[in-house]
Structures are given as structure tokens and as C-alpha cells.
Image: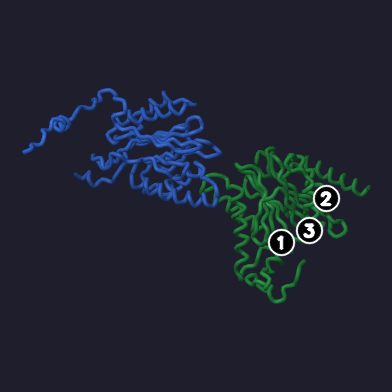
Amino acid sequence: MSSIGTGYDLSVTTFSPDGRVFQIEYAAKAVDNSGTVVGIKCKDGIVIGVEKLIASKMMLPGSNRRIHSVHRHSGMGVAGLAADGRQIVARAKSEAHSYENTYGEPIPIKELADRVASYVHLCTLYWWLRPFGSGVILGGYDCDGPQLYMVEPSGVSYRYFGAAIGKGRQAAKTEIEKLKLSELTCREGVIEVAKIIYGVHDEARDKTFELEMSWVCDESNCQHQKVPEALLEEAKAAAKAALEEMDAD
Amino acid sequence: MNDINSPHSMGTTIIGVPYAGDVILGADSRTSTGLYAANRDSDKITQLTDNVYLCRSGSAADSQIVSDYVRHFLHQHMMQLGQPATVKVAANLIRLLSYSNKNMLQTGLIVGGWDKYEGGKIYGIPLGGTIVEQPFAIGGSGSTYFYGFFDQEWKDGMTKDEAEKLVVKAVSLAIARDGASGGVVRTVIINSEDVTRNFYPGDTLPLWHEELAPQNSLLDILSSASPEPMVS
């Protein structure tokens, strides 16, 4: 699946003979090795969930957030190098802000995704810059309804019903495909996403993790916010119960 | 004779009225330099995009330049977004230019159009560059003469005919009293399907108090009684 570049991988401005840019592919590996980020589009909004791997027991719960609000109506879950992700979020906030100042309306999510993707892509064009070692799942709610986009380190951006990046993305995608997203409300979606993240977490390999979730939906008045405490606890409990049921088989 | 060097101004009467989800814009057609009517047949309702139009008043040059710039930016915006512009965005772009250049510009503008999110909408952008969304908007020097009339006669939920009659009546009232408004009445109706332009020449407009009916000109009499050419 992956091959070494041997000489064609020293610079992001070098193509290999078979048309690949290895530096971008290596950047994507940084994302693949990070904690899973899942996003789904339910019938009334978006839910984003992150498997936040905790490096040290000394860390305060709730710190090192992986989900950020970009604007009132949109948010991003970040995977890969945290510092790189912070830059992408900063850029997205700035684009959203300047769009609203010029055009007098909140930035359409499609336009926001285009701008973030252009920026990420920009950093793959020059030898004096390195590609971002992080990918983001961007969810938002504008006058065209809820939308979910994913931006990869290559600068590619697609719109999705359900998306996952990080360590457990293969398993997560399989689980997402089983869901009937068009019939799910965000309340139900939060429970499902929690189950998926608990399900893909590899107890043996990884340390403990903290579940971080956010949504933007009718119930949250089209504002991007953390999933309310009570619902989050309910989701965690349901996810743990589902795990035990699986183990019991 | 200083007037001949006065900047072209559109004393003007402009109106924008939404009705039943669509929008009608109306204007007179006089462009004046001082006391001289430089153009008695102007079109003050300019197109920005297929679905958004602009009524211009104040300095003719200023309002034309502003509308040219906004048309350009709006088209760029539409290409980026991949769909028709919204009236709100068009109005905000006008506002950006009007406010940032308020020291140099003298324009009173009414933006009206139809988009799929909000339907028919009117935005007024008067002299200083405020933007205000209104259930109807009137502007220009002639509008002062029918503030009361409009307050009384405008109602929510008019039909297309009611709205158009109201607009034409108001502009003709203004033309009767305001020296800087005159000529013909133009209207533009914008809905979800298309845009219709209508034209009301002076002789189709009602006569108001103390206005004189048109009289036959001596020139008519002379030409009708011209003698047959002599044949030898």
C-alpha cells in the first residue's frame, strides 16, 4: 500500500515518476496516526466527535480541545499535529470573519470549506513551506441547511454525509455506513457517534482517552456548541453499555 | 450660466415596494444640471445581476460608478459561490462602498431584487452609507412630496397591479411638484421567474391639481393645412 520514495520524497515540489507527491502522502500519515475524529450529518444538523488520546494523567480534563468553533454557525474537529490544526482553525476563523464584514451575512459553509481547502493546498505548492500535518472535519449550518466537509492535508475537500479520520477511521466508516442518517436526529446521532468512538478505541494499543463532542443543529438554534453535559453523559453510558454487550458475546 | 457647469444630478424620485413575495421598483427619468434637464429620458433603474436591480439618486456620476463597481464584485462573488447573488449581499456591497467613501460620494440608493432564500426584498442605502431593510423605500428629492401619501396608501400584501399603480401614482405626484423630477415613469418588476420593464410616458399619467392638460401645438395646425405642391 505505501512505498518509500527513495529520492523523490525529499521535497514537496518533487513529483515521483508515477505521479505522486510523497511529502503530501507522508503528511497524511501524521493524520492517520492520531486519535479518531468522526462527523455525521443527521436530518436536523451535524454531530462531531473526537477520540482525544490523553498523553499524561497530569492533564486537566477538558483541556487541549480538539473541536473548535469557527463561527457562530460552524465548527471543526482536528486530527493530526495539534499545532498545525490550530493554524487551520485560526485561518478559518479569519476567513469567516472577513466574509461577514464584507458581505453582511455568515459565510456559507461551502465557501468556508473552499477557502480552508485552498489555504491547506497553498502550503503544498512551495518548497519553503511544509504541508499541514493535520486534517479537519468541518460541520456547519447555513441557509442551505446542515453540511459536513472534510479537508485533507493535500488540500482536497469533499462534502460528506459521514466522515472519519485518524487511527480508527476504517472501522468508524463501516459503522457510519450502517446508520440511517436521513432518519436520525442529532440527539440520537450523539449517542451513535459516542458508540462508534468507544468502539474503535483500541484499549491494548492506546492509553486512555477523553470523548469530546459538539453539534450544530435545530436544537442548538443553529449555533455550534459543545454537546450539553447531560446528553454527553447519557451518550458515554450508552457507549460503555454497548461495548460490554459486545464483550459479553 | 454657472448652472451649465453644475455636476449632473438626478434630483429624482425613486421607489421600491415588495408585494406578495416579489418586488417592484419605480423611478422618474430626469437628469438635471442646475436648471437644465440634461437628460429627460434617463433610466435610473440599473441592473446589477439577473435578479437584483438598483434605483439611483443623487449625483449621477457617483451612483453610476458605485453601481459599476458593485456589479463587478457581485459577479465575482457569484462565480465563487456558484449560484445567483442574494439581495442582502448586493445591498451590503453597496453599503461598503458608500460608507467607506462617504466624504466623496453623494448617492441615495435603493436595492431591490428576488432571491430563493428571502424572496422579494428592498434595502435602502441613503447618503451616509447606512443599510436598512424596509417594507418599502422611497428616495430622491421628489420623495419628500409623497411621504404622507405613501404612509397612508401603502399596505402589506398588495397585488402586483395595486403595487404598480401605487408606484406610478406616487412618482407622477412627485413629478408634478418637484422641479428636479420629470419625464416618464419607469418601473421594473422582479419575481422568481423573470424581470419586466414598463414605461409610462407623460401623457398616460394622471393630471393633478393645477396641472394643465396638453394643448395642440401650432406646428400641428401648420403641417395639416400644408398646400399641395404646384405642378406645372
Work out whether B216 lies above or below A23.
above
Mark 3 against mark 1, which lies toward the viewer?
A: 3
Outermost front residue: B232
Please provide percent x and percent y for residue A47: 72, 45
Instruction: Tell me which label, 3 or 2, sits earlier in the chain.
Output: 3
Instruction: Tell me which label, 1 or 2, sits earlier in the chain.
Output: 1
Instruction: Tell me which label, 3 or 1, sits earlier in the chain.
Output: 1
Mark 1 against mark 2, which lies toward the viewer?
A: 2
User: Where is the C terminus of chain B found, in terms of image quarters?
Assistant: top left
Q: Is residue A145 left or right of residue B126?
A: right
Q: Is residue A113 left or right of residue B71?
A: right
Q: Is residue B44 visible?
A: yes
| Nearer to us in this view, A39 or B207 | B207
What chain letter is assigned to the residue under label 3?
A
Residue assigned mark 1:
A81
Residue at (68, 59) in percent of width and height: A152
Work out whether A20 lies above or below A225.
below
From the rendered image, report the letter of the chain displayed in blue: B
Residue assigned mark 2:
A198
Residues beneath discs 3 and 2 located on the same chain: yes
Q: Give the structural element (helix, strand or loop) at label 2.
A: helix
Estimate how packed mark 1 is, as few (under 14), some (14 to 19) or many (20 or more) residues with alpha carbons within 10 Å: some
What's the distance in space between the residues labelled 3 and 1, CA to CA? 13 Å
Estimate how packed mark 3 is, as few (under 14), some (14 to 19) or many (20 or more) residues with alpha carbons within 10 Å: many
User: Which amino acid, mark 3?
Assistant: Lys
As drawn, the label of residue A167 is 3
Please provide percent x and percent y for residue B65: 38, 49
Outermost left residue: B232
User: Where is the N terminus of chain B found, in terms of image quarters?
Assistant: top left
Residue at (34, 32) in percent of width and height: B200
User: Which amino acid, mark 1?
Assistant: Leu
